[in-house]
Amino acid sequence: MSEAYFLYHSIGMYPGKAAEMAAALADFATVWGQPDDSQWGRVLPLRQRFIDRWRAILKAPQGTVTTCDSVTQGLHMLVTSLPQAVLRGRTVLVAADCFPSNHFLLSGLADRLGFSLRTVPLRQGAAFVEDDDMLAAWTPDVGLALLTWVSSTSSHRINLVRMVDHGRQMGSLIGVDITQAAGLLPFDVGVPEVDFALSTSLKWMCGTPGAGALYVGPDLISRCEPSLRGWFSQPDPFNWDITRFAYAADIRRFESGTPSCMAALASLPALDWHAGQDHAAILAQNRDLTARLFDVADGIGLRPITPRAAEDRGGSVMLALPEAHPGAAVVAGLRARGVTTDHRGQTLRLSPGVVTTAAGCDQLDKALAEVLHG
């Protein structure tokens, strides 16, 4: 596996990933292909183990976490289940550097659900939305604020404690997208207490697409009535009386029909691997390597758009590329030299993780110099 792998903001790798995923999927095929009735008895407990792994990452209580296909779908599940009074005639607050998919969803729901979407802009020439600007826009009319813990385009990390404290004073519901740091930076849904949280199993979790996680706080669960409901939304899924439906008291009310399991089972080896690691050591390695990336940037004359202070950033270092070197061409040149990364426009995104090494950073340093300066 490449030592110059810098794609933890996107996919994520760990030693043995391909073999363990193949084994998990082969086991599923064996179970599901048996001509008997053992399938659900084997598969549903594995899905629950996936959920429990996410509960441990989030430090969330029993009955507060379920699966979703993506952060966007999980956000839709939550927002459309809220009582009308939470959003109608009020404001939903987001930052302009949120994950664009979430913004696409909220802008489409605004008229339908009767809220105004307030998007806090970046200052001229800035790479991320300043915390102060977010707080200034967060007024008492905000019914819900969706926070992006770590930006996918700058790796800027918000001061979550400060945000949540302000939001409580405003009386808002508070949700947080933790995707860009989940599994790397410690997170606790209760410290500070948020109303809901969303993530996928990609990136630092090293899982697969389609394996999202939605946390909803116990107090909020009881107020939600998901419109997409079905037999698994009930306390007893085997209630066949079509005239009698009741929501489960816990997070199961956000489930609907027969649960999707494949992505959870395919990601479970990665979550099991992660659960067995020294998380402090993983973070320390990342901090050592990101410090090296800042040195690489300084040496080659590229401007970092990621804050240098560790407490202000996630696990990535984003660099501004000169206009004379289109991002796609730089990434292609690095790929040809054995370095794996990507770009967003003229932003080069670099994210070292467990398979990345100091030698890989040296390889990047040399490859970047060749691509940019010949």
Image: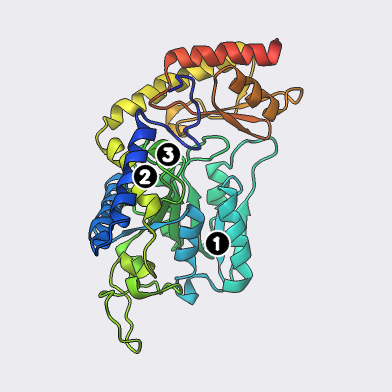
- Residue at which label 1 appears: 92
| SS at mark 2 in the image | helix
Q: Is residue 305 above or below residue 269?
A: above
Pointer 2 local density, CA inside 10 Å: few below 14, some 14–19, many at least 20: many
Q: Which mark is residue 267?
A: 2
Q: Mark 1: which amino acid? A: Val
Q: Mark 2: which amino acid? A: Ser
Dividing the picture into quadrants, the one containing residue 237 is: bottom left
- Residue at which label 3 appears: 181
Residue 61 seen in the current view: no
Residue drawn at the location 45% of the way across and 51% of the way down:
210
> Mark 2 and 1 residues: CB-CB less than 8 Å, in contact?
no
The answer for how far apart the CA atoms under marks 3 and 1 are is: 23 Å
> Mark 3 and 1 residues: CB-CB less than 8 Å, in contact?
no
The location of residue 15, given as percent across then percent down, is 35, 28
Q: Which mark is residue 263?
A: none
Q: Earlier in the sequence, mark 2 or mark 1?
A: 1
| SS at mark 1 in the image | strand
Q: Earlier in the sequence, mark 2 or mark 3?
A: 3
